Image (cartoon, rainbow, N blue to C red):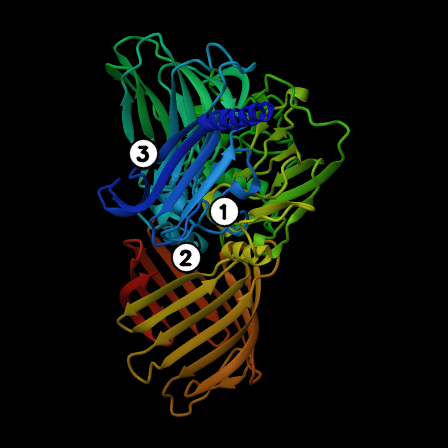
Amino acid sequence: MKKQIIWLTVFLGIMSTHTIFGQNIVHYDLTITDTIVNYSGKEKRAIAVNGQIPMPTLTFTEGDIAEIVVHNKLKESTSLHWHGLFLPNKEDGVPYLTQMPIEPNETFTYRFPIIQSGTHWYHSHSGLQEQIGMYGSLVLLKKKDDPTFRKGIDDLPEVPIILSEWTDIKPENVHRMLHNANDWSAIKKGTVQSYSEAIKAGHFKTKLGNEMKRMLAMDVSDVYYDKFLINGKNESQLSQFKGGEKVRLRISNGGASSYFWLNYAGGKMTVVANDGNDVEPLQVDRLIIGVSETYDVVVTIPKEDVAYEFLATPEDRTNSASIYLGNGKIQLKSRMPKLKYFEGMKMMNDMMNMDGSMDDMGMDMSLQKMDMNTVMYPEISGNNKMKMDNNMDHSNHSMTKEQDIVTLNYGMLKAPHPTTLPKDAPVRELRFELTGNMNRYVWSMDNKVLSETDKILIKKGENVRITLYNGSMMRHPMHLHGHDFRVLNGQGEFAPLKNVLDIMPMETDTIEFLANTEGDWFFHCHILYHMMAGMNRVFSYEKQVPNPYLPNKKWAYNKLQRESNQFHFMAENDFATNGNDGMAMVQNTRWSIGTEWRLGYHDRHGYETETHIGRYIGKNQWFMPFIGFDWRYRKQNGELEKNLFGQTNTKDQRAVLSLGAEYTLPMLVKFQGEVFQDGNIRFQLMREDIPLSPRLRWAFMVNTDKEYMTGFKYIATRNIGITTHYDSDMGLGFGVSLNY
């Protein structure tokens, strides 16, 4: 009898344990499929999850067990990353780093405990899928008996908000165009900054100085987007809220590359959390949310029968998206004025040395406190021109013309409870410089992309302190997987916890975290196209247990590295009345393989092709040594030509190898020197993209073989141009240029 009682007790214990844990399991099925969307009047391919974009909002309570079953019905592999969540490394959702990709028609189950609360989001970590629909809100609620539960904040009615953008151009094509310095996005946005526009704005000297320092036009964001979206719509209304009510907006920036200014027509916003972590409430008039960041803000509906606009404006201010809170007449928020790009260009010129390096000008910059772009904001600077020099007093950042505008920066964030790390733990100090090359769209850390580095080994139990300096001219939202880090912002033991740090140009910021969860964790810029260009690192815990999802970790990591250093293709061909000429090129971070051709319509004009295989050298990549092959035929009856050095050659039949180098001079002119196997030498100067007006480009070439060319191209569409040029071999011609 005693034995039976014991067995009955064990059985009941097992059953009750199963029931308790069973109640805590929150299950979601996510089915990923191709779909067609129409955001701009054109039907385009996108990816939907459970038939919707954004993906479904997933809600859990701290203490739950998440069980998420993913059914991949695409014709390509996929994955899901749980942005900002603390979980076992194998559940983190990074293909080739924490798991193998979920292949077509496969089902994969993510299962992990929910051990935190806050506003987070989730997205694909495969290729560029995030750009075309694979993003969604992820809300982790506090337990009702949580000692950190804040009355008047955590019990308010709440709305998950996820911001995003849409482009009609395939994201793979967007990425390729960025690498090839295609300026179609600038044309669409009206931000080319051509010479005619510079003269009109009184900034001819500024434009000249810009190109003397071998810089392309000032840019704020990389991509032109056709639509900006809040919860998948450009405009929507939440009419259930009444006058006098407060609403908590759980905002995630699910955009692939867009920062958003957030403004509210109903007055100030109270920031109560950031990146899923509570902060001491603070009131602001506006804030900018970096790519992949989350903010929780509380807003008030001031009056009955009025719907107040919550406005999200991309940093380049090309358009906006709105959601109206309340029921009744719509109260709009004033739009942000167009940026003053030439003022930004002037500032950028003052920050750059002639060799392309940054001049920090003695300014102590960190934590978004000194927004270098302020010179471009008409609502702040008015018509005043801000002179950047070392004698300026930036201590109180008093550039603001309208002092009543309170803009959030990281220095204002304060945790409600101490966040200090263990004082007796060993400290590992690391420093990274964020580096980049806008001309070739290479993004790196310490001038190395992921394919050129190995994992960074850390030990469990260490405090890892990282100093980040942004030496590039773009801002970068750096995201650490699997951990929160303290941002050392002057708040002492109440330093805020984050998992994304937006670092503006020339800023230096310091973060630190406790290494407490073993595995391989991604650390990367969350601008999707920067990440895919190589601005990544991996923190790897020493002596970690094997990952069951990665049977061959070395092979998988090599695959991940290759993904961030892919070759990109471009081609252009001019069909003209005097002949056909064009070029094709493939290039990656360091290598360039290019072929040019000139084909006449008869033997007297001849045929010519040159191929160069080169490798870019140096941080700024101004210099590229190469090997080449030159083949040409032209019917000249044996006539010899002399170059400027008195050397003779014939174009009747010429096939020679060469060694040479190309160097980018001030004014973005390419200087090329080449020694051929027959002993001949050639030097050449060329530039093909001088922006005379927003759509008109001028090109020229001259070399020591006494060849020369000049021409104009009018950019009609993304892939078509109208051209005219004069060539010393071919004469005058008119035509149509096609490019890819």
Q: Residues within 10 Å of mark 1 (few under 14, many from 20)?
A: many
**Picture quadrant of residue 614:** bottom right
**If the image is split into quadrants, where does the N terminus sit?**
top right
Dot 3 amino acid type: Gly
Residue 317 in view (yes/no): no
Mark 3 or mark 1: whose residue is earlier in sequence = 3
- Kind of residue at badge 1: His
For label 2, the residue is 689
User: 507 above or below 149?
Assistant: below
Q: Is residue 301 left or right of residue 560?
A: left
Q: Work out which quarter of the rendered image holds the C terminus and state it.
A: bottom left
Which callout, 3 or 1, points to the residue nearer the camera?
Answer: 3
Identify the secondary structure beneath mark 2: strand
Q: Which residue is mark 3?
A: 232
Closer to viewer: mark 1 or mark 2:
1
Query: In whole angstroms, how far apart are the C-alphas of marks 1 and 2?
Result: 24 Å
Residue nearest the viewer, comparing 543 with 318: 543
Q: CA distance from mark 3 to mark 1?
A: 24 Å
Q: Which residue is mark 1?
A: 530
